[in-house]
């Protein structure tokens, strides 16, 4: 949604969103009615295909397979949750109050929560590959903790970063024809906005960047060491495939999501 200071009104500690400027309406129509459905459809198809491929019996033994399945499933659910918005969105608001209520308190809540959990999946994926390269002996003894870490991080993000936001800080406002999300502009809101951005975007972004730099450096050192001893055709192949897959996955995530995470 768009918040224009010249087009909003302050009522006490509330900021209500009114109609968007006329010069913005054509761009919003193209964004929601043409571009968004294409991206949603492509995302659903791509993530469904990825999940089906990752569940093949031959790939169950791959270390990164658990993370890829969880990541594709989270992204798939996120795209599905965006679909109702395509049919009812009017510019930057909603023509129906029930749809506005759903998107304000449930739809965007679930979409943002899934995105945040996806970033933590990549954090743990990078952490495992980092430990596999720099501390291989310790890494072999702690492979069973992957699912526990994912569940704990999901509960933490869900309870602390998004439930207060969705249930207490957002509400539906409108004029009877158009309905919008509105939110408090109090000091409590500012504090929680900073905390939520730190938990869901800032912290995982820093971890992903730092861990992947460590992965690249460690991988380069290991390849150089294997090259010097003339043993490049041995177990290095498996390590190479996993490491390159992790770096490629995180690079694509950075290109697609970092701009949003930094500005959120």
Image (tube, rainbow, N blue to C red):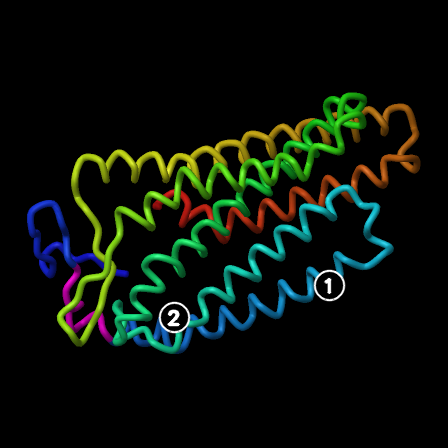
Is residue 95 part of the magenta span, yes or no?
no
Q: Residue at x 76, y 32 (%)?
A: 143
Residue displayed at 89% across by 35% down? 235
Q: Residue at x 34, y 45 (%)?
A: 263
Mark 1 and mark 2 lie on one chain; the one further toward the N terminus is: 1
Q: Please, is residue 33 above or below residue 6 in the view?
A: below
Residue bounds of the magenta highlight: 17-25
Q: Report the side of 243 relative to 172 (left or right).
A: right
Q: Which residue is mark 2?
A: 85
Secondary structure beneath dot 2 equals helix
Q: Position of residue 200 (x, y in %)?
A: 44, 40
240 or 178, which is in the foreground?
Answer: 178
139 or 236: nearer the eye? 139
Kindly identify which residue carries mark 1: 52
Q: Position of residue 75 (x, y in %)?
A: 56, 57
Horizontally, residue 138 falls left or right of residue 205, namely right
User: Is residue 20 on the magenta stretch?
Assistant: yes
Image: 25 above or below 219: below
Residue 179 image position (x, y, % from top left): 22, 68
Across and down, in percent, residue 132 comes to 75, 29
């Amino acid at each position: 949604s768009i918040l224009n200071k010249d087009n909003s009104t302050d009522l006490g500690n509330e900021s209500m969103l009114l109609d968007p400027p006329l010069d913005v309406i054509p761009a919003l129509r193209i964004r929601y009615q043409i571009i968004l459905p294409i991206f949603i459809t492509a995302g659903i198809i791509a993530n469904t295909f990825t999940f089906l491929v990752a569940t093949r019996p031959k790939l169950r033994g791959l270390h990164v397979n658990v993370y890829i399945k969880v990541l594709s499933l989270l992204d798939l659910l996120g795209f599905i949750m965006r679909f109702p918005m395509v049919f009812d969105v009017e510019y930057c608001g909603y023509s129906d109050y029930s749809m506005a209520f759903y998107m304000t308190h449930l739809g965007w809540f679930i979409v943002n929560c899934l995105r945040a959990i996806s970033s933590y999946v990549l954090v743990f994926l990078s952490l495992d590959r980092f430990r596999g390269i720099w501390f291989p002996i310790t890494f072999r003894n702690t492979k069973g903790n992957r699912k526990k870490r994912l569940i704990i991080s999901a509960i933490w993000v869900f309870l602390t970063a998004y439930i207060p936001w969705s249930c207490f800080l957002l509400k539906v406002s409108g004029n009877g024809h158009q309905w919008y999300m509105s939110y408090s502009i109090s000091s409590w809101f500012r504090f929680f906005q900073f905390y939520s951005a730190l938990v869901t975007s800032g912290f995982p972004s820093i971890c992903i960047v730092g861990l992947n730099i460590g992965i690249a450096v460690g991988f380069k050192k290991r390849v150089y060491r294997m090259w010097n001893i003339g043993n490049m055709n041995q177990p290095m192949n498996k390590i190479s495939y996993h490491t390159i897959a992790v770096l490629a996955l995180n690079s694509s995530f950075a290109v697609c999501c970092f701009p949003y995470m930094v500005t959120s």
